[in-house]
Amino acid sequence: MVMDGVPTVIRGTGSYAPSRVLRNEDLTGIVDTTDEWIVTRTGIRERRIAAEDEATSDLAVPAARAAMEMAGLGPEDIDAVIVCTLTPDMLFPSTACLVQSLLGLRRGIPAFDVDAACSGFVYGLESARGLLAASRKYRNVLLVGAEKLSAILDWTDRSTCVLFGDGAGAIVLTRGEEGPGGHILATDLGSDGVNSGLIHMPAGGSRVPASPHSLEGRQHFLKMNGREVFKLAVRAMVASAERVLEEAGVSPQDLVGIIPHQANIRIIESVAQYLKLPLTLFPNNVHLYGNTSAASVPLAFDEAIRAGKLSQPGPLLLIAFGAGLTWGSTLLHWEPLS
Ligand SMILES: CC(C)(COP(=O)(O)OP(=O)(O)OC[C@H]1O[C@@H](n2cnc3c(N)ncnc32)[C@H](O)[C@@H]1OP(=O)(O)O)[C@@H](O)C(=O)NCCC(=O)NCCS
């Protein structure tokens, strides 16, 4: 079973997390919080924090190299590069152009960023599939989700700074019908801009350019209404999963695994409950990394593959939700990548 258009398959995955670990106990010295509060409300125990001189592109590069290596491809084989991020190295040029140069990919190939916040990776996957469908000149697309969220966290706001971390995940998407990997069967993407104010960073763009006033108002940091986001995240992820499964004629009970966005273990538990599926089908690493936004799905996907947690062939679902609001699901036919 293959969706409309050119068959595409994920042939390799990779991930990278910076070495510095920030534990919940460490946060108790920064804001008024406790390990117990963070663990019971979110499941998060620690997160990784990039070094001062490590930007998003620096996290993207090792993840991308690992994905290319698994796919058996070199820099000369990549025909386009997409980076999904809400924390680009700078507003422009795109982080994808920086990654192209750092990896030594061919000069002249298309490179662009996708910003759909925590849904970025599933949006990027559809963009990569679109390129492969658009022209035979694309055979292998490198897709990276990478974030340095620590750079936009307000370390005086306990309601947000405990939730996020830094990291990167990558895949190579290739034309192909046969063989191991994740064959894309169906995709569902959506958005709701009416609720754009629920998670946002007010300043630094054209609406509120940087000024002494914006700095004083701490407007260059991520702001979030966590309680509202929680409810909408569960509803949107469940509805998106149901749509994509219905479109492909696959029953939830047939799934061999679900890789959800890793924001909060309670969100993952609620999604499992609504879909009437056991939590064991949902590989998760939120306790180790917190919410790494666009990096979270490919990071969890890569870790699950390398840990041998996706050893059964069958339908596999990726689901995400994020600022925008945005959401999305990609249904794969999974043939284990050893
Ligand atoms: C953020 C989140 C963990 C908060 O959990 P919650 O159960 O909804 O908690 P509430 O927001 O109701 O806050 C409860 C209390 O804890 C306090 N609190 C918030 N952060 C705290 C922290 N780090 N430590 C201790 N107390 C904290 C609040 O001030 C509030 O106190 P109050 O009742 O005296 O006002 C939860 O709403 C969530 O995970 N939302 C989704 C966030 C998310 O994943 N966003 C990204 C999606 S892509």
Image (spheres, helix red, strand yellow):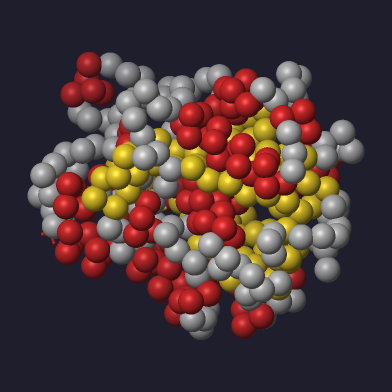
Q: Residue at x 61, y 37 (%)?
A: 65
* Numbered label tally: 0
Q: Nearer the viewer, residue 111 or 74?
A: 74
**Outermost residue, top side:** 212
Is residue 214 among what the camera can see?
yes
Q: Quadrant of the N terminus?
A: bottom right
Q: Residue at x 59, y 71 (%)?
A: 257
Is residue 126 among what the camera can see?
no
Relative to residue 229, is residue 14 drawn left or right? right
Q: Residue at x 17, y 59 (%)?
A: 35
- Pinpoint residue 234: horizontal percent, then vertical percent: 44, 67
- Pinpoint residue 94: horizontal percent, then vertical percent: 56, 24
Ligand 1 quadrant assignment: bottom left
- Indicate whether 102 appears above or below 169: above
- Pinpoint residue 188: horizontal percent, then vertical percent: 65, 59
Q: Nearer the viewer, residue 133 or 217?
A: 133
- Indicate whether 72 appears above or below 137: below
Q: Residue at x 61, y 67 (%)?
A: 310
Relative to residue 99, is residue 264 drawn left or right? left
Q: In the rendered image, which quarter is residue 66 located in? A: top right
**Outermost residue, right side:** 136
- Indicate whether 87 appears above or below 133: above
Q: Quadrant of the C terminus?
A: bottom right
